[in-house]
Amino acid sequence: MAEPLLELRQLSIAFGGLRAVQNVSFRVPRGSLTALIGPNGAGKTTLFALVSGFLRPDQGQVFFDGRDITGHAPHLNARAGMTRTFQIVQPFALQTVRENIAVGAHLHIAGRAAALAEAERVAGLVGLASQLDKPAADLTVAGRKRLELARALATRARLLLLDEVLAGLNPQEIGEMIPVVRGIADSGVTVLMIEHVMQAVMNLAAHVWVLAQGQLIAEGSPAEVTRDPAVIEAYLGPGTAERLREAHVT
């Protein structure tokens, strides 16, 4: 495995009696495109919050580019090159697409003109070049998803944590977004994505980790994990793997 850009060691957090994340450890290779999957309520977004600094773990450590960043504030992690997106996209509705992307660029670029120029460059990477002067409020759901990607990229991210960037899109929009995500990874940005759209996971991810009830239950290629009985049980319920096996034999 290539040198890890991100490494999690025994991360855990509980909310009252609920152990949302339990002893999760894995390494994300530099330059890879990988995925974290699991049923609703598995703890995936909570794990992203721990990694990116929005939550502090009860135990365990997060290493980014070889440095222990456990508990570091999100803005510090973003400045270091780790940026996350969110399931619910909330752009600055009254600002243009260009201005929204420039907000991300301002993390490293002080001047307004230079930040706006960088916003135009980044917009081209995600297919928003023709909508730069449109108010963000006027974008479709698919357009807002692209804007969320662009704002994250504009921070000069080296690691992108994508939280269900395809949620809410129709099949055609998903098909159009897959090459955008692949292009980001091909440009050298390391991508770890939470995703429920298995079409995208199968097309994009080289390696997949599966989380259920806060614990890692499987990892491997997308083909391997989707055949794993523990994964089938986690998604479809107890006994499903055995019933599918018996049906296949019959």
Image (cartoon, rainbow, N blue to C red):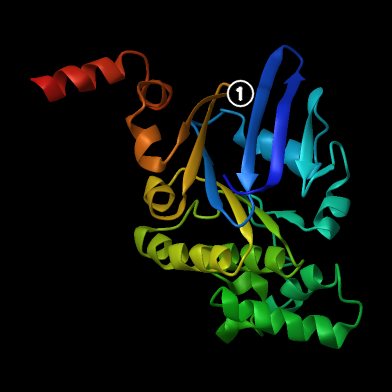
Q: Which residue is mark 1?
A: 214
Q: Residue at x 69, y 16 (%)?
A: 18
Q: Is residue 107 above or below residue 112?
A: above
Question: Type of residue at label 1?
Answer: Gly
Q: Residues within 10 Å of mark 1 (few under 14, many from 20)?
A: many
Viewer-closest of 237 and 88 = 237
Q: Is residue 203 above or below residue 188?
A: above
Viewer-closest of 142 and 50 = 50
Q: Residue at x 49, y 55 (%)?
A: 166
Task: Work out which residue is located at the far right of the displayed protein and give it.
Answer: 110
Q: Is residue 185 above or below residue 63?
A: below
Element at label 1? loop
Q: Residue 105's x, y, as percent?
A: 79, 72
Q: Residue 14's x, y, as percent?
A: 74, 19
Task: Work out which residue is located at the far left of the displayed protein and give it.
Answer: 250
In the figure, is residue 177 to the left or right of 56? left
